[in-house]
Image (cartoon, grey):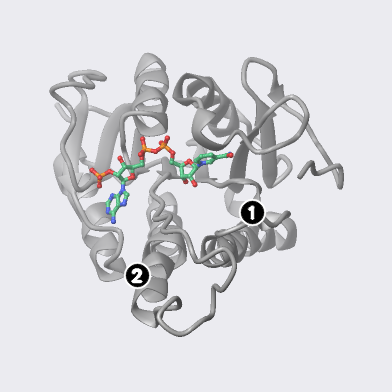
Amino acid sequence: MADTSPIVLIFGAGPNIGKHVAQSFAAKGYQIALASRTDRRDTDSTSDNTIHIPTDLSKPELIADVFAQVEQRLGAYPSVVVYNGALRIPDDKDDPLGKGKFSFDTYNKKLAVNHLSVLQALHHAVLGFRTLPASASKTFIFTGNILNSSTRPGVMSFGIQKAATAYAIRYLAEQKPYEKEGITFYYTDERSPTGDAVYLDINGPAAGPEYVRLAERKDQGPWLHTYIKGQGYKDFGGDIKQ
Ligand SMILES: NC(=O)c1ccc[n+]([C@@H]2O[C@H](COP(=O)([O-])OP(=O)(O)OC[C@H]3O[C@@H](n4cnc5c(N)ncnc54)[C@H](OP(=O)(O)O)[C@@H]3O)[C@@H](O)[C@H]2O)c1
C-alpha cells in the first residue's frame, strides 16, 4: 500500500540547513525528497523514507521534473516545499560594475539559482498543493538572509536576487491570492540576538524545528520570518544592525 505520509521537498539539500530540516520533518512522520546535485544520504541519513532527486538549480527548466519525480516515486506532490539552494559569488566590493569585474553571464547564473528557479518552484508547488486534501499543510519556505532589507559590501548581485525573491514571497503572503486554498509563504532569516546577520554561523539544527513550526501553522504568519537560534521568531522591524 502506498505511504500516505505527507512529503517535504527540499531544494538545496546540503549538510547544514537541508540535512537538519529533513531530520526535523522526518521526526514528524514526513517522507523526504532531497533535490541537489550531490546525493548525501549515505553520510547524512535522515530516515528510510528519504529519496534524492539530482537537479541543478542553475537550470530553472529542470524544476518541473523534480516535482514530477516526487509524485512518481512517493505517490503524491509535496505538502511542504523548502528552497534552500543559493549561489553566492561575491562582486568586486569597490567596483562591482567595472570592466572585467561585472559579468552578465555570472549574474544570470546566480539569478537562476537565487530567483528564477524559486519562481518555478513556487509555480509547481502551488499546482501540487491543489492536488492535496484540504487538511494538508501547504507551505512554501525560502531560506533568505538580511540582504532583502540591508546592504553589505561585495554582495550587490546576491542582494538584488534575494530581494527579488523576498518580494515574491511578501507579495504572495500579503496580497493573499492563495489564502482561501490554505497556502502559506515564508522568507526565513536567522539573525544574531542583536539583529545582525549570522553570516557563516548559520545554524542548521536551529532551522529544523523553526521550519516545522511554520509548516504546522494553519494561518499565514509574518512573511519575513526572522528568528534567533533557540529563541524563535523575533520581529526586528527597522532595527537592522550594520
Ligand atoms: N541568515 C543568514 O545570515 C544566512 C547566512 C548564511 C547563509 N544563509 C542562507 O542559507 C542558505 C544555505 O545555507 P546552508 O548552510 O544550508 O548551505 P549548504 O549546507 O551549503 O546547503 C546548500 C545546498 O544547496 C545546494 N545547491 C547549491 N547550488 C545548487 C545548484 N546549482 N543546484 C542544486 N543544488 C545546489 C548545494 O548542494 P549540491 O552542491 O549538492 O548541489 C548545497 O549543499 C542559503 O539560502 C543562504 O543564503 C543565510
**Labelled pair 1, 2 in contact (Cβ < 8 Å):** no
Q: Look at label 1 and name its amino acid.
A: Leu
**SS class of the residue under badge 2?**
helix
Q: Identify the image quadrant of the N terminus.
A: top left
Above-or-below relation of 139 to 154: above
Residue at disc 2, CB closer than 8 Å to ligand 1: no
Between residues 111 and 63, which one lies in front from this camera angle? 111
Q: Is residue 232 left or right of residue 140?
A: right
Label 2: how many Cα within 10 Å (few below 14, some 14–19, many 20+): some
Between residues 128 and 139, which one lies in front from this camera angle? 139
Residue, x 49% and y 65% (percent of image)?
91
Label 1: how many Cα within 10 Å (few below 14, some 14–19, many 20+): some
Q: Position of residue 164 (x, y in %)?
A: 59, 66
Q: Which quarter of the rendered image does ligand 1 occupy? A: top left
Return the residue at label 2: 109
Residue, x 62% and y 62% (percent of image)?
163
Q: Look at label 2 and name its amino acid.
A: Lys
Above-or-below relation of 184 to 49: below
Q: Identify the image quadrant of the C terminus.
A: top right
- Give how far apart the Cα atoms at labels 1 and 2 are: 19 Å
User: In this figure, what is the number of numbered marks?
Assistant: 2
Return the residue at label 1: 147
- Is residue 219 in view? no
Q: Position of residue 218 (x, y in %)?
A: 64, 34
Q: Position of residue 230 (x, y in %)?
A: 63, 15
Q: Is residue 242 left or right of residue 67?
A: right
Q: N-terminal of the two: label 1 or label 2?
A: 2
Residue, x 23% and y 18% (percent of image)?
47
Q: Position of residue 176 (x, y in %)?
A: 69, 59
Residue, x 69% and y 17% (percent of image)?
231
Above-or-below relation of 96 to 212: below
**Residue placed farthest to the right in the image?**
238
